[in-house]
Every structure is written in C-alpha cells, then in structure tokens.
Amino acid sequence: MKKIFVASALAIASLSVSPMFAAPAAAQARSTAVADVRVAAAKSNAFTTASQQIQTTYKAQIDQQESRGQTLQAELNVLVAKYNEEAKKTPQNQAALQAAAKAVQDKRQSASEELGRIGAPVDLAIAYVEDQISVRMNEAIKAAMTAKKVDLLLNPDAVLARETNVDITDAVVTELNRILPNVTITPPAGYQPGQLVQQRNQQLMDAARAQQGTAAPAAPPANGSQPTTR
C-alpha cells in the first residue's frame, strides 16, 4: 500500500503548477532556483497525515485488495504456466496456444477490474487529498520564491547541472505546511478526481477575462466621427 501513496505523490506534479506566473513583487535579487513540487507535495504535513488517515480509515478495503490480489495472482500464475507448456510443445497446437493466451489476457483484465472496484474508495480519497494540495501549490511556490528572493524557478528535470544551494524544495514544503496544514480525506458527494483544480483554473480564467474586459477601452466609431443625437 505504501507504493500506492508514493506513486500518488509523484503524480501530483503537473496539475498543481501553472506554466508561467509573475515573479513575487518583493523579490529584489535576480536569482534562479529549482524545486521539485512532487517531492514537496509528498513531504508536506497535509499529505503525510492524510496518508496515515487513509490507511486507517480504509484498512478493510486495503487489506481486502491485498489479500484478493494475492489470490488472483496465484490464479494468473497457473494460467501463465499452462500457456508456457503449450508454447513449448512441438509441434505447437495453435488453437490451444491462442486459447491459453486469451485465458491469461482475460484473467489479467478481470483481476485488474476487480481490484480496481475494491480499491475505488481508497483511490478517490487519495485523489481528493492530491486535489486539495494542488490548488494551493502555486501559492506555496510564490511564497517560497519571495522568501528566498528568487524570480525564476525551474523543474530539476530541466537543469543539466546545479549547486545544492539552489534547490528550494524544502522552502516550498515549509510554505505549503503554513498555508495548508491539513486536508480532509472524505470527498464530498459527487466528487470527481481533479475537480478542485478544474474549478480553480476556471475561476482564474474567469477573473482574467473580467479584468481584460474592464481594462479594454471602448472602441471609437468606425468613421472616426462623434455620434450625433436627434
């Protein structure tokens, strides 16, 4: 189950950070830094605590998924062994070989679907935790940039070489812990993964459109003359 949470934390990345945003106004020094937002999210108090709560709250589903997964894997191993036996025969019986291959494929698919149904409540809770962290990540990044007087932040994957002192991931964690000390693991009714991020993005887009509409001057008449009244 720990692997699920690690993978989940690493998957948080692109949803949480906008491609571009203005540098903090308080930053005076012209400096560049790197930060791994996936690591920051995984190290945050909110995610760590929520992960522990999920493992406690959904223990029945987690244990059932693990136990059933072992059973299904054993059943799959039997089918794989039968396929291997057919494949070794000389001459091969193509009909039997194809049937054995299909049995393996069908078993894998049905096992995946069954385990997915068992773990669905856990996956939804994890997604909701990720979503809550994602909508506050930009805020934490900007605060960390202000604190460290950084006006250009890069993803470590985009950097060829760097000194260790340019990594402000821990500063992002600090700000995230301050801004979002905890999250809830119980999704509201009707919640869909990524819903909070989508809503936040829509709010930002609506605000940007409203600002552009307010700032845009009224267009003059096409012929350049003032309108007449009667």
Image: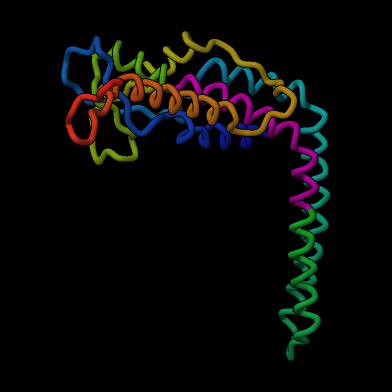
Q: Between residues 83 and 140, which one lies in front from this camera angle?
A: 140
Way the structure is coloured: rainbow
Q: Is residue 39 left or right of residue 222?
A: right
Residue found at the very far front of the displayed protein: 230
Query: Quadrant of residue 5 in the image?
Result: top right
Q: Is residue 67 left or right of residue 15?
A: right
Query: Quadrant of residue 79 in the image?
Result: bottom right
Residue at image position (53%, 28%) is 197
Q: Between residues 224 and 218, which one lies in front from this camera angle?
A: 224
Q: Between residues 96 and 212, which one lies in front from this camera angle?
A: 212
Query: Which quadrant: the C terminus?
Result: top left
Q: In the picture shown, does residue 180 fall above or below 216?
A: above
Whole-percent x, y for residue 205 in the image: 43, 28
Query: Which quadrant: the N terminus?
Result: top right
Residue 113 magenta-highlighted: yes
Q: Is residue 165 left or right of residue 139?
A: left
Q: Between residues 120 and 22, which one lies in front from this camera angle?
A: 22
Whole-percent x, y for residue 150 in the image: 24, 19
Residue 131 magenta-highlighted: yes
Residue at image position (45%, 25%) is 206
Give the main secondary structure, helix, strand or loop, of the magenta stretch.
Answer: helix
Residue at image position (46%, 34%) is 13
Asked whether residue 164 appears in the rendered view, the answer is no
What stretch of residues is rendered in magenta?
A: 111-137
Whole-percent x, y for residue 129 in the image: 61, 24
Q: In the picture shown, does residue 52 fall above or below 163?
A: above
Q: In the picture shown, does residue 22 fall above or below 109?
A: above
Q: In the picture shown, does residue 89 fall above or below 117?
A: below
Whole-percent x, y for residue 83 in the image: 76, 72
Instruction: Tell how many labels.
Output: 0
Residue at image position (29%, 13%) is 146
Asked whether residue 205 appears in the rendered view, the answer is yes
